[in-house]
């Protein structure tokens, strides 16, 4: 739409009438661009000459450019398969016609005006289901079935075209609304309830926002609200809070009570966000910073960008950490409580990043699981631990933690078998530690793998026992040999916690499982465990995790020390 | 096929501040709009309120109730609405009432005040049958009077 005849550096061009025409054209184009009805002009056989944004969306073209020069009837037949033949006939014929056509996105009225032999105009309006309510003057979002891409483009375009105007201080505000628990609605109640819910969400958004604000369904569980509320950022925050409040209220949809809530991320132009091209990214960072909580409102803060940048850098560093040899195993001693002798070690991974320094496993293990790096890291861990343990006296075992992700993807059993073969470590000296989270998946393949490991002669220990869901049924249905009692019970010296520890010990004993108490730090805890009949323990009282070169203090080496 | 009848019972927290006069004025405006909309949508029902809570029964087709309830949920003069029941019914209990309203001086309202006493009352703890019974009692007694 840019004028090629810029007056800059040239003669003042154009006579008054053509200026007026340009302005009128521009106004018309702008109005049609914002209209919620679809509009197009085609030639006599249906080739698109011009088209507005609403119709580009409804016909599911990826962009305006893709639409121009294409056959409208052919494209629309794809989105409205049940009306395909009527559409083709309408565009092939030479008469004006009105059609009522349906798609999963809703029902539309399509009117094609065909003056003799000339260009045709096409008008398309959404028709509401059931009685039309007076208040619903505009239909904010009829976007189910549209691709996210188109909606993102529409949003970008709306942001790009916005111009400040009107009285009072005005700024452009983008509120990204992410619905929590929406996928569960689709999964349990079906897509028709999910779609109806999206319509209600859109209406609630509309009830809060002001005339002229734009509400878009970006796809899935995300909505965008473009607003020009006054006083910033207080105005935007109060709109955001009202959104979170209203969306968190119970919905009645097709006979079901539905509870969801909303996380709202806000970016304000000239209020933390300098360029309009950053609005979407900033609002997205804000909404992600509260995602996973039960709703809330957050204004973009430049620190979020720093966090996101650090996260990305950490990802990159983590992908290279194995190659750069930045991981190291530390070993924490485990004692037999009847003899007070070291009977084994738990291998604990440490990441000494060249760029980030020492990174806690609590930070990088979830990231590695998410990135899929955990399989390679897990393989390195088990191979390194087995190779090290093979050099220890034969009564000393090694325990290695295994992530649930390693059971889901990758060949865990094969990796462990190969690590044992290569190191020459007897299988009975290797123990793998799993957490209850693994068992929640209730997957038969998990059980198969655990049985295969057990058949190889390995021990399987259940880590952090008592902190998760701790269903007792796991204890009978999975092949464990050891329970590791979580530190939170061991360190709590209240009567109740101690009674709980004694009960766990008794339970394990009657099931024939050995027990190991974690996090033992005081003599008193130590004594209580011995009295309760606990088999073994680890904790700072007996020794912190230490690097391999200091293991010699605790165990004699069978081979000559490499140092 | 005629739409089957449903009844919705819910309790919510009032967000209307101010004194009894402010409350009365807001509720009057709520009732005026409700009666107009309900008449058009074939909805009958009854409302009971005090300074802290609303309790309301709505009867009509499932679709009509859902539409009206959605309007109610968008009203910022209340919040924390909890649905106590939403079930098919044989016949209307509040026939002829597009929205009855329990009188502030009535015995039923005193009972409602007692029921809603206490600092940390959660709307979810209300008993739908009890609320329904109170609304019915009020209509019976005020009719008899």
Image (cartoon, rainbow, N blue to C red):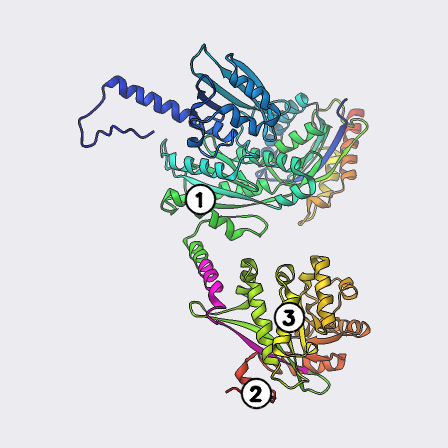
Q: Chain of mark 2?
A: A
User: In the displayed structure, would residue A374 be above or below residue A168?
Assistant: below
The image shows residue A164, relative to residue A91, as above or below, that is below
| Label 3 – label 2 distance at C-alpha | 26 Å
Tell me which segment is drawn in magenta: A310-335
Tags 1 and 2 in contact by the CB under 8 Å rule? no
Q: Residues within 10 Å of mark 3 (few under 14, many from 20)?
A: many
Quadrant where the N terminus of chain A is found in the figure? top left
The first of marks 1 and 3 along the sequence is 1
User: Is disc 2 on the same chain as disc 1?
Assistant: yes
**Residue identifier under label 1:** A280
Q: Is residue B34 magenta?
A: no
Residue A69 in the image: x percent, y percent? 43, 26
- State whether residue A47 appears in this view: yes
In the image, residue B13 lies at what x, y percent?
A: 64, 41
**Mark closest to the chain's N terminus, 1 or 2:** 1
| Mark linked to residue A416 | 3
Q: Residue A203 occupies which quadrant of the picture?
A: top right
Label for residue A552?
2
Q: Position of residue A376 (x, y in %)?
A: 56, 65
Choose the circle earlier in sequence order: 3 or 2: 3
Residue placed most toward the observer, A210 or B53: A210
């Amino acid at each position: 739409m840019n004028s090629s005849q810029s007056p800059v550096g040239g003669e003042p061009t154009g006579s008054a009438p053509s200026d007026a025409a340009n302005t009128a054209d521009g106004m018309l184009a702008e109005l049609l661009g914002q209209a919620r009805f679809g509009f197009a002009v085609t030639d006599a056989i249906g080739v698109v000459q011009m088209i507005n944004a609403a119709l580009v969306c409804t016909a599911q073209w990826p962009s305006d450019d893709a639409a121009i020069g294409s056959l409208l009837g052919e494209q629309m037949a794809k989105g409205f398969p049940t009306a395909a033949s009527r559409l083709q006939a309408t565009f092939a014929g030479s008469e004006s016609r009105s059609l009522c056509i349906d798609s999963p996105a809703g029902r539309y009225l399509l009117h094609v005006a065909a003056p003799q032999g000339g260009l045709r105009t096409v008008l398309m309006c959404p028709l509401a289901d059931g009685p039309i309510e007076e208040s619903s003057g505009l239909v904010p979002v009829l976007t189910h079935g549209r691709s996210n891409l188109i909606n993102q483009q529409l949003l970008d375009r709306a942001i790009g075209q916005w111009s400040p105007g009107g009285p009072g201080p005005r700024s452009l505000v983008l509120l990204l609304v992410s619905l929590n628990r929406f996928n569960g609605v689709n999964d349990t109640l079906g897509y028709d309830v999910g779609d109806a819910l999206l319509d209600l969400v859109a209406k609630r958004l509309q009830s809060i926002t002001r005339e002229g604000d734009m509400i878009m369904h970006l796809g899935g569980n995300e909505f965008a609200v473009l607003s020009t509320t006054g006083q910033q950022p207080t105005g935007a925050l109060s709109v955001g809070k009202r959104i979170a409040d209203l969306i968190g209220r119970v919905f009645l949809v097709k006979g079901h009570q539905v509870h969801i809530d909303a996380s709202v991320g806000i970016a304000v132009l000239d209020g933390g966000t300098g360029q309009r091209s950053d609005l979407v990214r900033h609002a997205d960072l804000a909404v992600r910073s509260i995602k996973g909580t039960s709703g809330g409102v957050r204004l973009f803060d430049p620190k979020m960008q720093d966090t996101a940048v650090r996260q990305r850098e950490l990802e990159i560093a983590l992908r290279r950490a194995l190659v750069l040899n930045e991981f190291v195993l530390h070993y924490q001693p485990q004692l037999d409580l009847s003899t007070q002798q070291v009977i084994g070690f738990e291998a604990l991974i440490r990441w000494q990043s060249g760029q980030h320094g020492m990174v806690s496993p609590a930070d990088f293990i979830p990231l590695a699981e998410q990135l899929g790096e955990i399989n390679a890291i897990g393989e390195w861990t088990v191979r390194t631990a087995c190779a090290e343990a093979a050099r220890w006296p034969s009564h000393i075992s090694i325990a290695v933690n295994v992530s649930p992700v390693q059971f889901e993807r990758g060949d865990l059993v094969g990796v462990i078998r190969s690590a044992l073969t290569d190191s020459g470590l007897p299988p009975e000296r290797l123990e793998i530690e799993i957490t209850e989270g693994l068992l929640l998946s209730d997957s038969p393949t998990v059980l198969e793998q655990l049985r295969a490991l057990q058949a190889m002669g390995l021990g399987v220990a259940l880590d952090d026992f008592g902190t998760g869901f701790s269903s007792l049924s796991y204890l009978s249905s999975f092949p464990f040999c050891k329970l590791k009692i979580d530190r939170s019970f061991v360190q709590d010296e209240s009567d109740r916690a101690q009674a709980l520890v004694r009960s766990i010990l008794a339970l394990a004993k009657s099931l024939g499982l050995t027990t190991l108490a974690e996090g033992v730090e005081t003599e008193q805890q130590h004594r209580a465990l011995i009295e309760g009949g606990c088999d073994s323990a680890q904790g700072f009282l007996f020794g912190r995790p230490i690097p391999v070169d200091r293991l010699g203090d605790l165990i004699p080496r069978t081979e000559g020390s490499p140092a | 096929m005629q739409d089957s009848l449903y009844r919705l019972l819910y309790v919510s927290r009032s967000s209307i501040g101010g004194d009894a006069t402010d409350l009365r004025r807001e509720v009057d405006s709520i009732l005026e709009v409700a009666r107009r909309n309900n008449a058009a949508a074939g909805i009958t029902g009854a409302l009971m309120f005090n300074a802290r809570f609303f309790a309301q029964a709505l009867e009509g087709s499932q679709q009509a109730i859902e539409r009206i309830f959605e309007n109610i949920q968008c009203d910022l003069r209340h919040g924390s609405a909890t649905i106590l029941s939403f079930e098919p019914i044989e016949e209307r209990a509040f026939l002829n009432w597009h929205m009855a309203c329990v009188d502030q001086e009535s015995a039923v309202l005193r009972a409602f005040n007692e029921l809603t006493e206490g600092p940390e009352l959660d709307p979810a703890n209300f008993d739908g049958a009890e609320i329904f019974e109170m609304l019915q009692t009020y209509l019976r007694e005020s009719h008899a009077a």
